[in-house]
Amino acid sequence: MKTKIGVIGGSGIYDMDGLQDAAWVSVDSPWGTPSDQILTGTLDGVAMAFLPRHGRGHVHSPSTVPYRANIDALKRLGVTDIISVSACGSFREEMAPGDFVVVDQFIDRTFAREKSFFGTGCVAHVSVAHPTCPRLSEACGEAGRAAGITIHRGGTYLAMEGPQFSSQAESRLYRDWGCDVIGMTNMPEAKLAREAEICYASVAMVTDYDSWHPDHGAVDITEIIATLQGNGTKARDLIGRLPTLLGAARAPCPHGCDRALEYAIMTAPDKRDPVLISKLDAVAGRIL
Ligand SMILES: CSC[C@H]1O[C@H](OP(=O)(O)O)[C@H](O)[C@@H]1O
Ligand SMILES: Nc1ncnc2[nH]cnc12
């Protein structure tokens, strides 16, 4: 199988340079219209697909990002591995603004989003005990180190609904829960990538200390935007190193991300809803 790297660019990352045969393409999805067109091309001989999560011009709020359409569209393009690049606040002194964190766990506190491709007429339960792919996360860590970025391996990301930032009491609570960083978008994105059997790694770029830090006051959007610019340059460097690290030929995921649906579907074949089954053609076509 061939590797196709999908990059979902978060706040401040709306484009990707250096692709050969670059073209923005529209992808139709039965799950709605994706956030934007998808930039396709190749980098060092590896196929790439870049999607700005909020759309060019930052149109979609964290609650209205069409997460299902985005993941479905990437799957339709043949994406095997997704790198999610996101801005985040930090709950740890040592995870400072400008640092990157390769997230490996999530606490999902979002509540106003569609979180699954499955439902009435085709029920499925996948495991998200380990919601990110260790192989892909390792490659992101290596690429970040090679780019000279201070990059922390492993961290728990609190996904909040937003769009407002947390109160100081919430910020302190999440810190006490053992969370390391906070953002508004990695859920349900990571869960949907698992349902679509796509390896998913999350690179969170610290922009602020949220609102718990006694020396930093409350999170402030102007501070975030200033830090985002430097973070974006580093993120482009990290992503540019991934094709060589991952290679064009892809072995099956040793952690089973690409087989997540193998035993997940509960609904008996004769009880399945044909309309839903047809919408699942890309996500679950391998097993349906
Ligand atoms: C620009 S501050 C808040 C905004 O930034 C993050 O976006 P993303 O995860 O797409 O990089 C955060 O989740 C909020 O949406
Ligand atoms: N403190 C914060 N909370 C939520 N999302 C963020 N994105 C960047 N900083 C954030």
Image: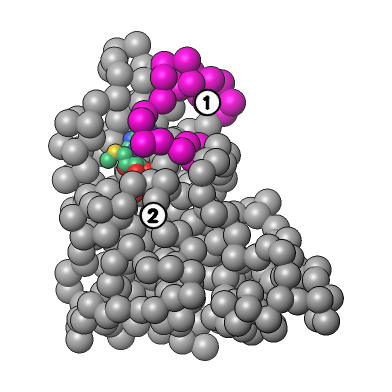
The CB of the residue at mark 2 lies under 8 Å from ligand 1: yes
Image-quarter location of ligand 1: top left
Count the marks.
2
Tell me: 61 left or right of 141: left
The span shown in magenta is 156-178
Is residue 81 toward the left or the right of residue 269 in the image? left
Q: Residue at x 39, y 51 (%)?
A: 64
Q: Is residue 146 above or below residue 122?
A: above
Q: Is residue 122 above or below residue 146?
A: below
Magenta stretch containing residue 165, yes or no? Answer: yes
Q: In the rendered view, tell whether residue 188 sits above or below residue 91.
A: below
Question: Which residue does the image show at 59% across and 26% down from the upper left?
Answer: 177
Q: Which residue is mark 1?
A: 174
Q: Of marks 2 and 1, which one's residue comes earlier in the chain?
A: 2
**Quarter of the figure with residue 274:** bottom right
Give neighbour class at mark 2: few <14, some 14-19, many 20+ (Cα, 10 Å): many
Q: Amino acid at mark 1?
A: Tyr
Q: Position of residue 61 (x, y in %)?
A: 33, 47
Q: Report, in whole angstroms, how far the alpha carbon at label 2 lies from the one at label 1.
A: 24 Å
Which element type, helix, strand or loop, lies under badge 2? loop
The residue that mark 2 highlights is: 65
Q: Is residue 110 visible?
A: yes
Tell me the SS state at disc 1. Answer: helix
Quadrant of the snapshot with the C terminus: bottom right
Q: Tell me which colouring the rendered structure shows.
A: one colour
Residue 63 has which mark?
Answer: none
> What amino acid is labelled 2 in the image?
Val
Q: Residues within 10 Å of mark 1 (few under 14, many from 20)?
A: many
